Image (cartoon, rainbow, N blue to C red):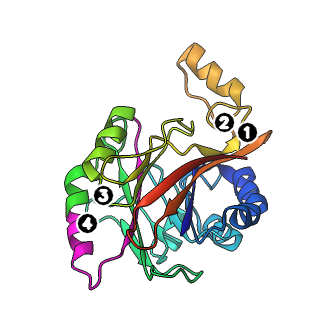
Amino acid sequence: MNVLFIGDVVGSSGREKVGDILPVLKEEYSIDFTIANGENSAGGVGLTKKTAEELFASGVDVITLGNHSFNRKEVVDIIDHPRVIRPANHPDIVPGKGFCVVAPAKSVEGVKEIAVINFLGRFNMPLVDCPFKTADNVLGNLSKRNPGPPVIIVDFHAELTSEKQAFGHFLDGRVTAVIGTHTHVQTADEKILPGGTAYITDAGMVGSGNSVIGVEKAEVIKRFLTGLPAKFQVAKEDIILNGVVLTIDNKSYKCTEIKRIIR
């Protein structure tokens, strides 16, 4: 089977790009299941019911979040959607859930369920529980399902490359793929780890290629020059889509290939 993971979708221009290009990618790569990080989909910060519905209408199957999960109060209208997940290492009292187990809309021989799990790093991020210990707990709970989901895709939303690499090796052989998000800059280190888990430090973004991580350049530069707060605006020129396509063996449930996408 083929799974498409789309990097952080930034603002309305990012959502429009997903709507335009996702049908093309699905046909070109015979995509069976699509995941997108949507934590920047509402004006560059957060998620709303409207932006989530747009992504679902475009063909996204599961939406993951990150450090901006709760920046918009409107998220309460969508956070309990069965295919919207926030980082699992938030405390239990936080609304929403950290993983979902769903059947692919497109029938795939040998694969009845796919689990998608979201984790948040702890460096330069909101206060959350340890992602490593939380991952052990979540995977333990999934293993109790009968049968457990054969395909497990992890979105690790984190700042540090070292934390992401450590997390990938920590989960190697235990999940199908560990995909990094958050920096909006696609890395060129896609690989299959020794235990068979596909890995990339960051999938990138769906946003302006002529920007600073999807934001208008001038205000970002001004902030670096002055150190003063600045109101960032989503850039809307030269919109690119970053992501990865995972090719998964339907019998071993291991990734045989991870391919970066830049459109």
Cα separation, mark 3 vs mark 1, equals 30 Å
Mark nearer the viewer, 4 or 2: 4
Amino acid type of the residue that numbered disc 4 sits on in the rendered structure: Val
Please say if 222 is above or below 181.
Answer: above
Secondary element at tag 4: helix
Please say if 62 is above or below 37.
Answer: below
Residue of label 4: 138
Identify the mark nearer the N-term, 2 or 1. Answer: 2
- Asked if residue 21 can be seen in this view, the reply is yes
Residue of label 2: 215
Cα separation, mark 2 vs mark 1, equals 5 Å
Q: Quadrant of residue 12?
A: bottom right
Amino acid type of the residue that numbered disc 2 sits on in the rendered structure: Val
Neighbourhood count class around disc 2 (C-alpha, 10 Å): few under 14, some 14–19, many 20 upward: many
**180 left or right of 13?**
left
Cα separation, mark 3 vs mark 4, equals 12 Å
Residue at the spot 44% in from the left edge and 58% down from the top edge:
255
The magenta span reads 137-159
Amino acid type of the residue that numbered disc 3 sits on in the rendered structure: His
